[in-house]
């Protein structure tokens, strides 16, 4: 129970309207970039299926949640601890994004130069968004 109270207090202290607005902005901006990166070729080809549409609609939730998670798990000061946590989140979340969006291509062995670019860039997105969330916690107390 003590651990639960700590997380609840941390969540209440960190999930301010300022942070939620910034996480929403990150979701719109970074979510759009992720959609363009992972589904852009399918959308441009006009091969939109229900599955693709679901991916497009759910993708902005990833940067929103990663921003909040980065803020929630952030140390009091931005430093190497925040970078390490962001790298861990990039590994976990980036792998999940790649598995969901490119898993069928990888399992089929269809490795193209475009797919290699996606494999390299996709984990960078959760890293940057998580570090942004950690940075936001240091900015939340400053007047706007």
Image (cartoon, rainbow, N blue to C red):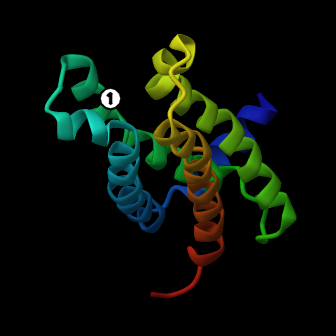
Residue at image position (62%, 67%) is: 137
In this view, 111 is above or below 140? above
Q: Which residue is drawn at 52% across and 32% down?
A: 97
Give percent across and percent down for residue 134.
65, 62
Task: Name the side, left or right, on which 74 lies relative to 50.
Answer: right
| Relative depth, front residue between 110 and 70 | 110
Residue sitting at the far top: 108
How crowded pointer 1 is (Cα within 10 Å; few <14, some 14-19, many 20+) is rated as some
Q: Which residue is drawn at 52% across and 40% down?
A: 113
Residue at (13% x, 32% y) in the render: 46
Vertically, is 143 above or below 92? below
Secondary structure category for the residue under label 1: helix
The extreme bottom residue here reads 143
x and y percent of residue 91 in the render?
70, 38
Say left or right for 42 vs 71. Answer: left
* Farthest left residue in view: 46
Q: Position of residue 1 (x, y in %)?
A: 76, 27
| Relative vertical location of residue 64 with respect to residue 38 in this rendering, above or below | below
Q: Which of 133 and 29 is in front in this view?
A: 29
Query: How many numbered marks, from 0 up?
Result: 1
User: Which part of the image, by quadrant, shows the C terminus?
Assistant: bottom left
Identify residue for label 1: 55
Residue 118: x and y in percent read 51, 42
């Amino acid at each position: 129970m003590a651990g639960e109270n700590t997380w609840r207090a941390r969540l209440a202290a960190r999930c301010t309207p300022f942070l939620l607005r910034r996480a929403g902005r990150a979701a719109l901006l970074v979510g759009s970039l992720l959609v363009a990166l992972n589904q852009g070729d399918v959308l441009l080809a006009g091969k939109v299926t229900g599955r693709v549409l679901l991916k497009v609609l759910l993708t902005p939730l990833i940067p929103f949640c990663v921003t909040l998670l980065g803020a929630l798990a952030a140390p009091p000061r931005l430093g190497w601890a925040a970078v390490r946590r962001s790298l861990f989140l990039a590994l976990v979340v980036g792998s999940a994004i790649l598995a969901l969006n490119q898993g069928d291509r990888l399992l089929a062995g269809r490795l193209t130069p475009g797919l290699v670019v996606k494999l390299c860039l996709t984990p960078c997105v959760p890293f940057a968004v998580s570090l942004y969330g950690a940075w936001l916690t240091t900015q939340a107390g400053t007047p706007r």
